[in-house]
Image (spheres, grey):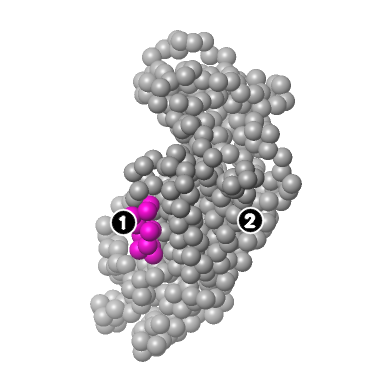
């Protein structure tokens, strides 16, 4: 988003940003108006993703050249008059492929990855163009479809004909484009575009409600600070957007107000069971109490058969504590780059194995070593279990089994025998704690874990490791 004089110049990223979060648009508008400064966040993982995206696009262009297509490249990065003129000239000349086409139809501008000539007549002549976008994601999401529609709209205004199709080229597809009929999404595109443009009136009516995009948003620090200053309901661990809306309708707008709400509820919820509101009220109560005490508080929940501590098996000398670290953007289909597991050796000494993987061959070998170790250990300790926290490890083991077509029977045996125990499910039904999230890191004070390295430093090191792995994978596979 850029203001030039009195006019706003908008991009496909701005449109997709609005779809992700209306408050993001409001903040970006203030940057364009000079009211706020754009946050300067350096994210090595994002930088590597951008490099991989550029490499994927370059590999696809090389593929087109190798297939015999004549390619016209529009130089530069902006949407200035010269790049727009060069794009229009290439289209009028009938170039087979136009790379980084610069298009402008105020207030929107865009640089498409690829324009591909098709033999459909238009105002250009006996031909016209369709949009091809290169994406790293294996699945095409709504934001990508919006981007394709916007680019197709811009192309249509040049050639007097909206393209019938737009395409996405994802990795690991042999550069085979996935087709999308533009007219199928036109109404959706117009609706989002109209709402987006209307939001630019700048009425200031947005709030930083937590959404999925927060995890990668440049404004996340500012928005998180505002929610804490406002004692926002979203800070209550486990609360849902539906519950927040219900509570707001009864003038319960802060975590403190929820903590002070009388039980049983003085009204019948329109959506959701009253018991779920009792639970989040109690969660708010302990969080407010913990905040006042300046420490993490916890209390045991009532014993319920089949839940909480009742899900814990009898301890066994053969028990294993298992944790995986993985990155879905490394190489072909991601990489589980660290198999970490702890167990007691025959002398009773706690032993930790850190099995690092830099390649898929390493990953397969580490997977097989871990499974073989478990099977052998279980032969000596039939009552042993593998403890992990949350569902990631189980899903990863299934993926690796399928990816490498190995250890299928062993994994099936472990799953059927309920050998893997999810401690997150145990904790969530065993205790109530004054935390905003029941992630294992947030609960560290409760199990007296003392870090040798601070969590921010550890996260930074983790980001560096992932950045190097992604860069390595990009160079090895050329992102194609």
Q: CA distance from mark 1 to mark 2?
A: 42 Å
Looking at the image, residue 329 lies above or below residue 244: below
Q: Is the C-beta separation of discs 1 and 2 under 8 Å? A: no
The N terminus, quarter of image: bottom right
Spot occupied by residue 150 in the image (x, y as percentages of width and height): 40, 61
- Which label belongs to residue 161? none
Which residue is rendered at x = 64% and y = 24% of the image?
Answer: 297
User: As drawn, is 410 to the left or to the right of 374?
Assistant: left
How many badges with numbers are in the image?
Answer: 2
Which residue is rendered at x = 45% and y = 26% of the image?
Answer: 310
Q: Which residue is mark 1?
A: 186
Looking at the image, residue 433 lies above or below residue 349: above
Residue 392 lies in the magenta stretch: no
Residue 298, located in which quarter of the rendered image?
Answer: top right
Looking at the rendered image, the disc whose residue lies closer to the viewer, 1 or 2, is 2
- Which label belongs to residue 462? 2
Spot occupied by residue 146 in the image (x, y as percentages of width and height): 39, 57
Which residue is rendered at x = 37% and y = 62% of the image?
Answer: 406
What SS does tag 2 mark?
Answer: helix
User: As drawn, is 91 to the left or to the right of 342?
Assistant: left
Q: Which residues are magenta?
A: 401-411
Dot 2: few (<14), some (14–19), or many (≥20) neighbours within 10 Å? few
> What secondary structure is the magenta-colored segment mainly?
helix
Looking at the image, residue 167 lies above or below residue 428: below
Q: Nearer the viewer, residue 84 or 60?
A: 60
Q: Nearer the viewer, residue 26 or 478?
A: 478
Looking at the image, residue 340 lies above or below residue 474: above
């Amino acid at each position: 988003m850029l203001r030039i004089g009195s006019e706003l110049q908008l991009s496909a990223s701005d449109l997709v940003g609005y779809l992700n979060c209306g408050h993001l648009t409001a903040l970006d508008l203030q940057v364009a108006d000079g009211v706020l400064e754009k946050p300067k966040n350096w994210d090595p993982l994002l930088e590597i993703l951008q490099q991989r995206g550029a490499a994927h696009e370059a590999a696809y262009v090389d593929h087109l050249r190798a297939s015999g297509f004549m390619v016209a490249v529009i130089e530069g990065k902006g949407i200035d008059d010269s790049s727009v003129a060069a794009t229009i000239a290439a289209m009028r000349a009938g170039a087979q492929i136009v790379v980084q086409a610069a298009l402008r139809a105020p207030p929107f501008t865009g640089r498409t990855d690829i324009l591909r000539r098709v033999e459909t007549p238009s105002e250009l002549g006996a031909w016209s163009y369709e949009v091809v976008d290169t994406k790293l994601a294996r699945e095409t999401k709504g934001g990508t479809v919006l981007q394709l529609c916007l680019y197709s709209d811009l192309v249509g205004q040049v050639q007097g004909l909206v393209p019938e199709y737009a395409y996405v080229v994802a990795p690991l597809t042999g550069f085979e484009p996935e087709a999308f009929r533009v007219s199928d999404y036109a109404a959706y595109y117009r609706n989002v575009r109209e709402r987006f443009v209307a939001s630019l009136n700048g009425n200031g009516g947005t709030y930083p409600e937590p959404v999925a995009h927060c995890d990668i948003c440049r404004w996340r620090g500012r928005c998180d600070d505002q929610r804490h200053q406002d004692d926002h309901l979203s800070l209550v661990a486990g609360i849902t957007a539906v519950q927040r809306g219900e509570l707001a309708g009864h003038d319960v707008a802060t975590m403190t107000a929820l903590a002070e709400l009388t039980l049983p509820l003085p009204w019948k919820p329109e959506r959701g069971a009253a018991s779920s509101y009792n639970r989040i009220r109690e969660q708010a109560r302990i969080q407010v109490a913990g905040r006042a005490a300046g420490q993490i508080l916890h209390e045991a929940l009532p014993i319920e058969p089949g839940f909480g501590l009742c899900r814990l098996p009898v301890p066994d000398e053969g028990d294993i504590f298992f944790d995986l670290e993985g990155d879905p953007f490394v190489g072909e289909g991601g990489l589980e780059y660290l198999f970490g597991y702890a167990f007691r050796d025959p002398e009773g000494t706690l032993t930790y194995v850190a099995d690092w993987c830099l390649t898929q061959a390493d990953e397969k070998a580490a997977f097989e070593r871990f499974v073989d170790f478990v099977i052998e250990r279980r032969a000596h300790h039939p009552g042993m279990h593998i403890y992990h926290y949350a569902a990631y490890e189980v899903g990863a083991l299934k993926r690796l089994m399928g990816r490498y077509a190995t250890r299928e029977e062993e994994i099936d045996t472990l799953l059927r025998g309920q050998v893997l125990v999810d401690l997150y499910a145990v904790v969530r039904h065993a205790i109530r704690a004054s935390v905003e999230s029941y992630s294992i890191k947030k609960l560290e004070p409760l199990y007296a874990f003392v870090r040798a390295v601070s969590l921010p430093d550890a996260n930074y090191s983790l980001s560096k490791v992932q950045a190097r792995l992604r860069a390595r994978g990009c160079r090895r596979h050329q992102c194609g």
